Image: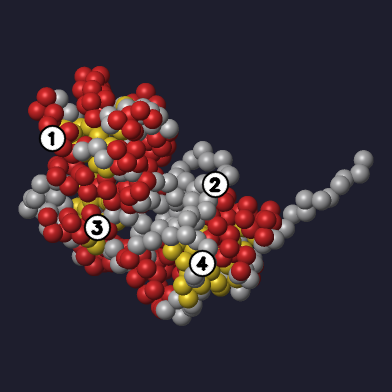
Amino acid sequence: MYDELKFEHCQHSKDPVLGCALEGVASVAAGINDVSIVIHSPQGCAATVASAFDAHEIDFTKRKVGCTRLFETDIILGASEKLENLIREADKSFKTRVMFVVGTCAADIIGEDIEGLCGRIQAEVQAELIPVIAGGFRGTSYDGINLGLKALTPFIPKTEGAEIDSVNIIAPQANLNPTWMADLTWVKQVLGALDIKVQTVLPHNTSMEELKSFGQTNANILLTHDAGYAFGKQMQEKALIPLILGDLPLPVGLKNTARWLRAIGVYFDKEEKVEEIIKAGEERVADVLRRRALMIIPRYRNLRIAVSADATFGIGLLRMLFEELEMIPELVLIRSNNHEAKKILERELQSLGISPAVAFGVDGYQIKKALQDSKVDAVLGSSWEKYMAEELGIKIAFDVFSPTNRDVYLDRAYMGYEGMLNMLEIIGNDWERAFRSKKIEWEQ
């Protein structure tokens, strides 16, 4: 068991660190090719949709987004006709195969029947209409990802599976690596080395043809512990595609990467090839650290550390920090809040034999309060936690996750063996910066 933190005076969120459900729905829609989005909202919500396209690095000229631009009178009197007119106009202008029609908080308040409206005019437009209610009342961006994935299920027919070894990858964007696409690339490369085909990545650069062949595969793999579980389980029931590896920490650090790979090897009967990949990866890490990081273990031994991240990396990092770097995780703060992640974390902590203080679904106030009440030497998180640590007098802060202050030009994986080295380089550089004097005045 872990010691779950309780916070007083938290009837409302202070400095929320997660976006609303609209952001999550938009991140799913933005990952589908030949799609347009009509949002029934005030104009400000268009910026939230734009951030989802930014996350997929989709060129501005390829974004097909319409907004009803609701005003006060629309909220009072209703705006169904305005939405219907925009859908028709967007259908003629964008000419996409699929159109997400997304209701926001304003549509929730009005009580717009978006599903009914889409059903009534579907025969009169070319695009397949997908109605989704995604107001902030519905939850966080992770809840929005779940809503977006659920909206895609009618497009996935039940099939007989695949003749060759293949998998689908689900929700690769639902993690805090600023260049999460590098993690996706690593997974695809390692599966390719095992002669396992990646059938569909959902949702990132996903065609409608890929979506309709989603069921022609042997398994689904979630690349997150923060969203997608309900969709994965639904695919088990509807399309008869097993969800595998969902109960394991993701491949972060040496031991978790080996455990994750071995589970794939067992499922696909590729144990021998997996062991070759593990051996090569561990030798690569040992060789680099032996030559360039001789002080790495003495430096970090018994460092009391707080981890503030999502469940994807927050859980995966614990074994690497404790067993491989000999740090002591004292505090674990997870941004999301789902039952499956809690079970995985509890099993991992029991296996490691440690009992840090833990909190799920944290906002900015709770993160700062937990750090203030703890006695940690260092914080591993994003630039938010870095600023909080400085304000609280915690000398060492590792700025690893999004949002980050770092200039990022090249995608860098955090998963797998190269991913471990990438994170250690960031951690090592931040350690050095923490001990550099900022007060030296050089005399002429």
Quadrant of the rendered structure where residue 316 is? bottom left
- Quick one: quadrant of the N terminus? bottom left
Q: Quadrant of the C terminus?
A: top right
Marks 4 and 3 sit apart, C-alpha to C-alpha, by 28 Å
Label 2 or label 3, whichever comes before in sequence order: 3
Residue displayed at 40% across by 58% down: 336
Find out whether the residues at labels 4 and 3 contact each other: C-beta distance under 8 Å: no
* Nearer-N-terminus badge (1/4): 4
Residue at the image point whose x is 34% and y is 38% from the top: 106
Q: Which residue is mark 4?
A: 7
Q: Which residue is mark 1?
A: 119
Query: Of the residues tagged 2 and 3, which is closer to the observer?
Result: 3
Please name the amino acid that badge 1 sits on. Gly
In the image, taking residue 173 as reference, residue 325 lies left or right, namely right
Pointers 2 and 4 in contact (CB under 8 A)? Answer: no
Query: CA–CA distance between discs 2 and 4?
Result: 27 Å
**Circle 1 — which element?**
helix
Q: In this figure, which residue is indicated by the disc labeled 2?
A: 404
How many residues crowd around disc 3 within 10 Å: few (fewer than 14), some, or many (20 or more)? few
